[in-house]
Image (cartoon, grey):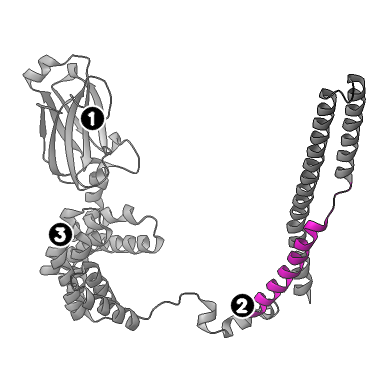
Amino acid sequence: MTFWIVAIALLVLALVILLLPLMRAARAQQRDQRQQQNIQIAREKKRQLEAQMAAGEIDQAEFDGAYLDLQTALALELDRSDGNVQKARGKWMAAVVMLAIPVCSIALYFVFGEYRVIENPELVRAMPQSQTAAAPQMTLDEMETAIKERLRDNPEDAEGWFMLGRTMMAKQRFDEAVTAYRRSNDLVANEPGILFALADALAMQNNGSLQGEPEELVLRGLKLNPRFPNGLWLAGMAAEQRQDFKAAYRYWTQLLPLIADNPASTREIKDLLAMLEQRDPELVSAAAPAAGGANRLSLVVDISPELKARAKPGDAVFVYAKAMQGPPMPLAVKRLTLADLPVALTLSDADAMMPAMKLSSFQQVIVGARVSPSGNPVAQSGDFYTEFGAIDSANPPAEISLTIDQVK
């Protein structure tokens, strides 16, 4: 009973909200039309008075008196039209709205609604799936059938083969998953996600072993994308299976900040790192210097004599490191002047522009130096520069020599 009281109250409120503007609009329209008619009649009478005066039928005094009477009558008529508006035009529309909305609302609710759920929520669980979910999820069998039909129509669909591989992995049909992933890899070469998926399927096909081809695929994928979480996970597993605990520790340590938003995965990786530390206690002491000393690039920066003669001693020099694959923003940067060259310096996480974008977060980096006469940190046409790429930030050369000898 409470439901119907609330429903009727809300329905009445909706009608009031709808009808008030409707009635006001109808009244305003009627008033405007009536006023326009009165004004038009007054104008016509004025023209008649002007014609009579021009013909000599009335003099100026008679015209002025008649015109004053006309203005007074018009003013009175307009005032009456404001106070006594005819309401017939809006009444039929209001009646239609008042009847149609309640009837249609109640009819639609009885067709599509279920008011008894308010007093008995268990009815939701008793409803068929088609009534409680607009788009029920497909079963794995239905998904497999749909994907195979899609591939019959388009056998060159790399995404379709990849989806089929994932479906077969979910159904633990690893041989078919390997076949699907290989087909996807044939169609789209050098895609890290496919390489890691294929490696995982091959490992599951071989009772979880990543040795041999699976590890080769993982390392190939990491060269293409060193920060791919699944790749670092698999690389750590492969290294741990080979008893290379240092490599496994390095891969999983790199993985940890990439999964910070996933508490369950973070706990799992921390447990694995703790397990490795128990197996090899030296990993803890080896990791401590790495945190402070690894990912430090030792550079010697100079400029060619030809370009130095074209620059000014006060020109800004930016020395930087950026990711080979990733955002263009430098991971570490220092600002000098041309007068400082030649100079020996280091770049590390301490030189990061943003806390979330550090040198240690990327394995493959490019180092460079640029002379900017304008002092603008963004590269511009006419700047002098040099770059040196494909440096392993975790295991860099002892010293990297940069000579600025190119013009942008």
Q: Which quadrant of the structure image shows residue 215? A: bottom left
10 Å neighbourhood of mark 3: few (<14), some, or many (≥20)? some
Q: Residue at x 31, y 42 (%)?
A: 357
Write down the residue under mark 2. Answer: 112
Q: Position of residue 359 (x, y in %)?
A: 25, 42
In percent of width and height, residue 76 lies at: 91, 37
Q: Residue at x 14, y 64 (%)?
A: 217
Find out whether the residues at labels 1 and 2 contact each other: C-beta distance under 8 Å: no
Residue 283 lies in quadrant? bottom left
The Cα–Cα distance between marks 3 and 2, rounded to whole angstroms, is: 52 Å
Q: CA distance from mark 3 to mark 1?
A: 31 Å
Which residue of the protein is positioned furthest toward the left in this rendering?
305
Query: Mark 1: which secondary structure?
Result: loop
Q: Residue at x 18, y 64 (%)?
A: 195
Label 1: few (<14), some or many (≥20) within 10 Å? some
Q: Could you tell which of marks 3 and 2 lies nearer the N-terminus? A: 2
